[in-house]
Image: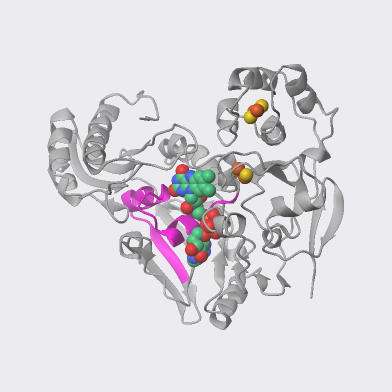
Amino acid sequence: MASIEITLNGARRTIEAPPTTTLLDWLRAEGLTGAKEGCAEGDCGACTVVIEAGASRRPVNACLCVLGQMHGRAIRAVEGLGRDHPVVRALAEGGATQCGFCTPGIVMAAWAWTRSGGDPHAALAGNLCRCTGYRPILDAMAAMSDDGETAPGFAAASSQFGGFHLPATLEEAVALRAAFPDAMLLAGGTDLGLRFSEHREHPAEVICLLNVREMQGVTVGEACQRIGAAAPYAEWLEACRADARFAPLVPYLERLGSRQIRTLGTVGGNLGTASPIGDALPVLLALGAVVECASPRGARRVPVEEFLLGYRRNALASDEIIVAIELPAPPPGALLAAEKLSRRHDQDISAVSLAACVEFAGETVSRARLAFGGMAATAMRAREAEAVLTGRSLDDDAAREAGAALRFAPMDDHRGAAAYRLEAARGLLRRLALRHARPDLPATVHA
Ligand SMILES: Cc1cc2nc3c(=O)[nH]c(=O)nc-3n(C[C@H](O)[C@H](O)[C@H](O)COP(=O)(O)OP(=O)(O)OC[C@H]3O[C@@H](n4cnc5c(N)ncnc54)[C@H](O)[C@@H]3O)c2cc1C
Ligand code: FES
Ligand code: FES
């Protein structure tokens, strides 16, 4: 049986542990105890390590990823920087650590940020510190700079470790799906990871899709984006930043999980889980996405509205795999908007979300697609509200009437009572009208 190989802190390592062991458990068993287990569910960031590939550095939650997924990749744990690294010294000398439990994770998130840049607050969205407070940490980050180091690139190859399969082509993946219909299909593992981390499960057969060539990357065409089902959110976000047509989605996607979650989490996984509060789903509904699926019977293209069937239910047949998502660009002149309401601004699941694509003929709405998350058993379009807006100016009166027409019976749980959700959804429709009137409206809202 082949062995898992990774590059850890610059040195090649051959691993004999079960492939569904979490990276965090393995690191700690190897004596690298810098990464901590705070929550084991991707929330606290105390376990953060960095995946390096060439010049790219992306933080991940070591508690959620398993060794098999990491085969062939270069990982940097905090021990790989050492006590004298400038990032470590900046935090230590800046009084940016007290009990120190969060510090190794913050070191790694900050080290990744010195390469990727962007808002330092956002870089820390996936790292909780209960005692220092973030001001000294952010002050220390302001003095950090990129150390210029690079790592080996990553070349995906098909591999197998017992019942853990890493196909490199779609043909292999489909054949494996047919041969092992009960196998766990694993992409980023940001939903499934809890089964490994909290429940310490070791499924007999796993098909990991992360290396499948046909499922990689986000390609931009004249009419649409093609989002590979194994492309992480980080790549979708970059593609949206680079394309003015999709740029209105950027602030929304920046609030999907944390940087750690976006390094591995995929749109394919959001569709696979089909949660009513999956944040990608209202966007796919508002833009009329098509889900490309493959099975031994051939390829199938399913409009996303037909793909989402109910609470955590989708139209995927037992022998099918999601290959990609075709996401049409909004027509020229259309208003594309996405808003998320959650109890906490960063790294929180939506209570209610709205994605909208509104087309105009002059000042009049000619077509509206409004899709909500958190308002029903699955993400869903609000057709009654769409009908109210059509043929009208998109103003506050129209938005209020559209809100009154909503026919949802929302979920009632700890993220929001049903009555709150309905009012919040109405508020988001009014905010859509406000955004139309004032394109400079701040990008995101939070409760
Ligand atoms: C701390 C934390 C914060 C989070 N925040 C958010 C958030 O803000 N918004 C949000 O929407 N989600 C959030 N999530 C949930 C999760 O990140 C998303 O649902 C993500 O899209 C899952 O993708 P994945 O690749 O990790 O899926 P996985 O966990 O690998 O798989 C999820 C499901 O999809 C199936 N699947 C995956 N890929 C395919 C495929 N190609 N074909 C068929 N089936 C497939 C799997 O079999 C499984 O059933 C969060 C999760 C965590 C742990
Ligand atoms: S232990 Fe909390 S995010 Fe991994
Ligand atoms: S220093 Fe104690 S949790 Fe951050």
Ligand 3, by image quadrant, is top right
Q: Quadrant of the C terminus?
A: top left
Query: Is 265 part of what is drawn in magenta?
Result: yes
Q: Position of residue 190 (x, y in %)?
A: 55, 52
Q: How many marks?
A: 0
The answer to whether residue 393 of the structure is visible from this angle is: no
Residue at 73 percent of width and 23 percent of height? 91
Q: Camera-side residue: 414 or 319?
A: 414
Q: Does 214 lie within the magenta span?
A: no
Q: Quadrant of the N terminus?
A: bottom right
The quadrant in which residue 36 appears is top right
Is 297 drawn above or below residue 351 in the view shown?
below
Query: In this image, 270 relative to 396: left or right?
Result: right
Instruction: Identify the residue shown where x is 63% and y is 70%.
Output: 169
Q: Is residue 86 left or right of residue 334?
A: right
Q: Position of residue 404 (x, y in %)?
A: 13, 39
Can the viewer see residue 56? yes
Front residue of 432/109: it is 109
Q: Hey, which quadrant is residue 271 in on the image?
A: bottom left
50 over 328 or under it: above or below: above
Where is residue 94 drawn, in percent x and y? 73, 16
Horizontal side of residue 399 vs 240, given as left or right: left
What are the residue bounds of the magenta stretch? 264-293
